[in-house]
Image (spheres, grey):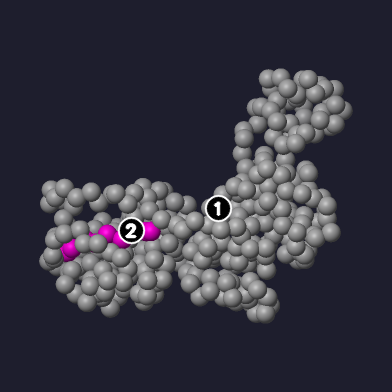
Amino acid sequence: MASTTLRPEPISVAEAARYGIDWDQLQRTGWRRVGPGQYAPSALPDTPELRLTAVRLRLPAGAAFAGRTAAWLHGLDLPPCDPIEVVAPPAVGISGRVGVLVRRQAIDEGDVVIRRGLRATSILRTLTDLAWRLPLVDGVAAADMALHAGLLTLDDLRDRAIALNQRKAVKRLRRVIELAEPATESPMETRLRLILMLAGLPRPEVQWPLIGDGGRFLARADLFYPEKRLVVEFDGSTHKAEPGRRQPPPEPADIGRLLNPSFHDQRRAGQSRKRDQAGATGARLRHANAGSAGGSAIRGRADVGSAGGSEGQWFEVRARPPSPRTSPPAGP
């Protein structure tokens, strides 16, 4: 029987034999190996769904996708297959394989849902696991994505923290809840906000509407300190196209003139400054007056370097490279 008559998912060697396809045929053009003893028609694209389906066919009853894999199944922008994460009851006989991380933990069926046709931990269980295992900034970024997408509310997370009570994961989850912000439109905005907050700066307003002369809407600032008239925008090539962003970044000249009538856009003054050295992990901090208390506090406490000039001065915030990750803890 031709492979095109098979359902569009991986099959085992034994199942292929039932269709009249022997092992030698599976080694030829038209098939590719996608797992131990598993093959798929080569016409099928190599997608995360295909890889997860191949793993699902090998999972015992009671197991479910978890961690970043489950987060991706819920629609969050996290890598689903690096590695593929699975949670299985302690008594279930299953071992990890290359590219698959298996954690043996008790899992209530109430914490399991079906997403994209696959068993996955619920969004509450998933965010709890990520808060426990990922670095703080990554855990908050995941929570921000889920909150912004309307998958749950902060109250849902608070109720989860209460239900966990004295378990080991609750402290990390409470910290994530404290720092989370549903209005955040992208993971890089989360990272920029936490650079400032974890450096000791006040919590900024998020997605703040900026209104110009005559009540004209100009833009929404990624981050805003109203008392200091300070706009903070993440600026990177990947950020402009990130899922969830509803608008292009505001024009600096418009914002600068709104915050300070004497604003001068130095980008158009012909000054040769390599402002994009930070690339997709940089951010520009726009301040109308470099001599204000806000400017000096930012320089001293958020590791911000001056880009030159005085009135309407631009500053640059550079995100530090992530520290080396250690092996994740065993679990809550």
Residue 179: percent from the left, percent from the top?
48, 72
Foreground residue, 248 or 12? 12
206 vs 5, left or right, is left
For residue 319: magenta? Answer: yes
Foreground residue, 210 or 264? 264
Which residue bears the numbered disc 1? 78
Q: Residue at x 38, y 53 (%)?
A: 281
Residue 277: percent from the left, percent from the top?
29, 49
Q: Regarding mark 2 in the picture, which secondary structure is present there?
A: strand
Query: What range of the chain is rendered magenta?
Result: 312-320
For residue 222: magenta? Answer: no
**In which image quadrant can residue 197 be found?**
bottom left
Foreground residue, 96 or 204? 96
| Label 2 environment density (alpha carbons within 10 Å; few <14, some 14–19, many ≥20) | many
Quadrant of the snapshot with the N terminus: top right
The number of numbered discs placed on residues in the rendered structure image is 2
The amino acid marked with disc number 2 is Arg
- Single out the mark in the foreground, 1 or 2: 2
Residue 134: percent from the left, percent from the top?
56, 61
The vertical placement of 67 against 258, above or below, is above
The vertical placement of 10 against 134, above or below, is above
**In which image quadrant can residue 192 be found?**
bottom left
271 vs 33, left or right, is left
Q: CA distance from mark 1 to mark 2?
A: 23 Å
Q: Regarding mark 1 in the picture, which secondary structure is present there?
A: loop
> In the rendering, which numbered label is found on residue 318?
2
